[in-house]
Image (cartoon, rainbow, N blue to C red):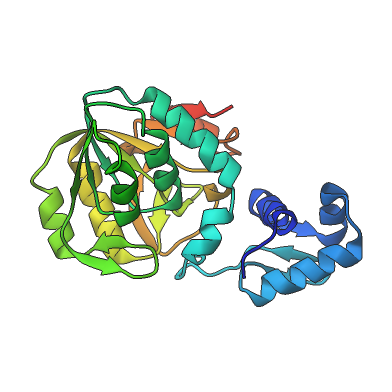
Amino acid sequence: MNPNPRQIKLLQQVHKHASCTVDELALCLEVTVQTVRRDVQRLSEAGLLARFHGGVRLPNSTIENIAYHQRENLHAEGKQRIAYAVAEAVPNDCSLFINIGTTTEAIAKALMQHTGLRIITNNINVAAILSRNQHCEVIVTGGVVRPRDYGIVGEATVDFIRQFKVDIALIGISGIEPDGSLRDFDYREVKVSQAIIAHAREVWLAADASKFNRQAMVRVAHLTDVHRLFTDSAPPEPFPDLLTQAQVRCDVAG
């Protein structure tokens, strides 16, 4: 399904709080309880929510991400704010890694006015966006293309990335757990992200508020491997202390 704007706002509330009652959602969305129940029914049938008596929560799957076209719509406004903040911080005339994700694709769109960038990416969507900027050079990695999101993964991708050392790695992530670990769902994608992190002078993480306390199966890295975090609202506990301990600069996009 393609959620409508009200359903997207409902999903954002559940992602923000991990679980909500039907009454809370009706109050927040300014609609009737019956409307919320109908939306919850559709969203749970699509696998985007899990129902319990009187409310809903996030699905518990740690092995499968939300479908790409659904992720495109989720938290779109927050991702756009993050993208503008990242683009403002990226200087002209530098080299970048950009990995797979809908947030990094938003960043690519925000970089269209930059000049002198050399971008290496395993994301065909990012390459298609930035290749329209005649003042930048885009290099696409080798590897296996995932049909569901046009991400490029595999050992050939890792070997290609190891040839470079770039100024900044712009990475997205599926989840940040309370111990500070960064996690994702596809171990092949994780191997690529780890190579990107290892071959960048600085690592900038772009993650909207829904990524905090979200679980996924495979460990990518830790907050101590990150230099800057760009997000769309103040991180919840225990992340402020974790970020301070890891010496990560946190930019909250206004």
Question: Please, is residue 208 above or below residue 18 in the view?
Answer: above
Q: Residue at x 91, y 59 (%)?
A: 32
The one of 27 and 63 positioned closer to us in this rendering: 27
The one of 104 and 109 positioned closer to us in this rendering: 109
With 72 as the anchor, is 189 left or right in this view?
Answer: left
Q: Residue at x 79, y 65 (%)?
A: 55
Question: Please, is residue 250 above or below residue 178 in the view?
Answer: above
The part of the image, by quadrant, that contains residue 228 is: top left
The part of the image, by quadrant, that contains residue 6 is: bottom right
Figure quadrant of the N terminus: bottom right
User: x, y percentage for residue 134?
Assistant: 24, 35
Question: Please, is residue 233 above or below residue 101 in the view?
Answer: above
With 38 as the anchor, is 120 left or right in this view?
Answer: left
Residue 157 visible somewhere in the drawing: yes
Residue at the bottom extreme? 45
Residue 242 visible somewhere in the drawing: no
